[in-house]
Amino acid sequence: MKKEYDYVIVGSGLFGSVFAHEAKKAGKKCLVIDKRNHVGGNIYCENIEGINVHKYGAHIFHTNDKTLWNYVNQFVEFNNFTNSPLSLSKGKLYNLPFNMNTFYQLWGTKTPKEAKAKIEEQISRYVVEKPQNLEEQALSLVGKDIYDNFIKEYTEKQWGRKATELPSFIIKRIPIRFTFDNNYFNDTYQGIPIGGYNKLIEGLLDGIEVLTNIDYFTDRQKFNQLSEKIVYSGKIDEYFDYKLGVLEYRSLLFENEILEIENFQGNAVVNYNDSVYDFTRIIEHKHFEFGKQKKTVITKEYPQEWGHGKEAFYPINDLKNQSLFNEYKKLALKEKNVIFGGRLAEYKYYDMHQVIALALTKTKKEFK
Ligand code: FAD
């Protein structure tokens, strides 16, 4: 007998929502469930004082893929926001990513030739055959001044460990530009949905049944019986009841403040490099949408150890966790009628455009 739904989709983040949208287009009946009290997963925006506050961290959409750009633009128009973060280091503000403006602010170098010579001189002091830790790796890539001003303390706060105790693979390369260009991303397309990310999710889930505040695991039997297939975008270890062990993450704590002023820092993102601040960044959300509200909302971002009750944000893709994930993946491949996908099910950091591309690939295969 045909079941009530073709798909029960666990998770209404980008993966689940794109899957649901494409399934509906293919004539399938879906039910989307989410354990949170809202849809959208980590791109959800909370409206505070008329400002779209990125509740789970600042999100800037960027991609080089025109098809993907057109895909998201069919649901909501994007503005022309360009991510140009600043970094506060030892009392001075610098432009990021590392470019001619940063080098001028740091050393007073005015031409690419002068800046290149300065960096080469800095690097030449730290020739390390095989960097043994993050500090050695960073010093050999960019030298002491950039490392001391922008990398050391920031990274130590991010990971809660000394740079000398962190593996070198965390930093594979450090992009450096010899142009006066503060655009953080190199991608052709970039922006923020006008009216916030919820519009994108609402567009994707239009006409689809959605239940929030529902955890799949409180009644998985019921949901399995309701549908032909499950699409699962939650944590893969949780799906298997953690029977092989727990996959580890880094977490973040977000502290919001409403300020009775129009403009706090004049920019959406300011990094706080120095260790005297426990937080790593302050986000001023109105600048994502060029807001003119009378008040402003800022969020301080505190990196956290992950544990019970904390949000799992960044997978720790070291050898131990990666090989545990590979074991779970083998189990997942044996699961009949379950499609796993998204950042938690694949234990991988994905940008938004990557997760959308992944969901589209899976749906193409499913509905071919
Ligand atoms: P999620 O959005 O996490 O969705 C998974 C959903 O599943 C959640 O809503 C969860 O509640 C639900 N769920 C889990 N388990 C269950 C269960 N048992 N029952 C019911 N529901 C369940 N990307 C960019 O492109 N640009 C950025 O600037 C950017 N900034 C980021 C900043 C931070 C701090 C972080 C952490 C990520 C950032 N990303 C950014 C990445 C982006 O957030 C992800 O690509 C995207 O959100 C992943 O979507 P997803 O559907 O895989 O996962």
Image: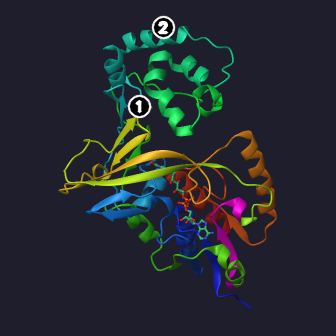
**Residue in the picture at 43% in, 57% down:** 70
**Helix, strand or loop at mark 1:** loop
Residue 258 pos. (x, y %)? 28, 56
Residue projecting furthest to the front = 276
Query: Residue type at mark 1?
Result: Pro
Q: Are marks 2 and 1 in contact (CB under 8 Å)?
A: no
- Badge 2 amino acid: Glu
Residue at numbered disc 2? 121
339 shown above or below 245: below
- Tell me the crowding category of disc 1: few under 14, some 14 to 19, or many 20 or more residues within 10 angstroms, Cα based: many
Viewer-side residue, 156 vs 101: 156
Q: Look at the picture and state if 290 lies above or below 171.
A: below
Q: Which residues are magenta?
A: 226-238
Q: Quadrant of residue 164?
A: top right
Residue 234 part of the magenta segment: yes
Would the CB of label 2 be found within 8 Å of ligand 1?
A: no
Q: Which x, y percent locates residue 289?
A: 29, 53
> Rounded to the nearest whole Å, what is the CA distance between mark 2 and mark 1?
20 Å
Please give the residue where the numbered disc 1 appears in the rendered image: 97
Task: State yes or no: residue 365 in magenta.
Answer: no
Residue drawn at point x = 65 percent, y = 70 percent:
231
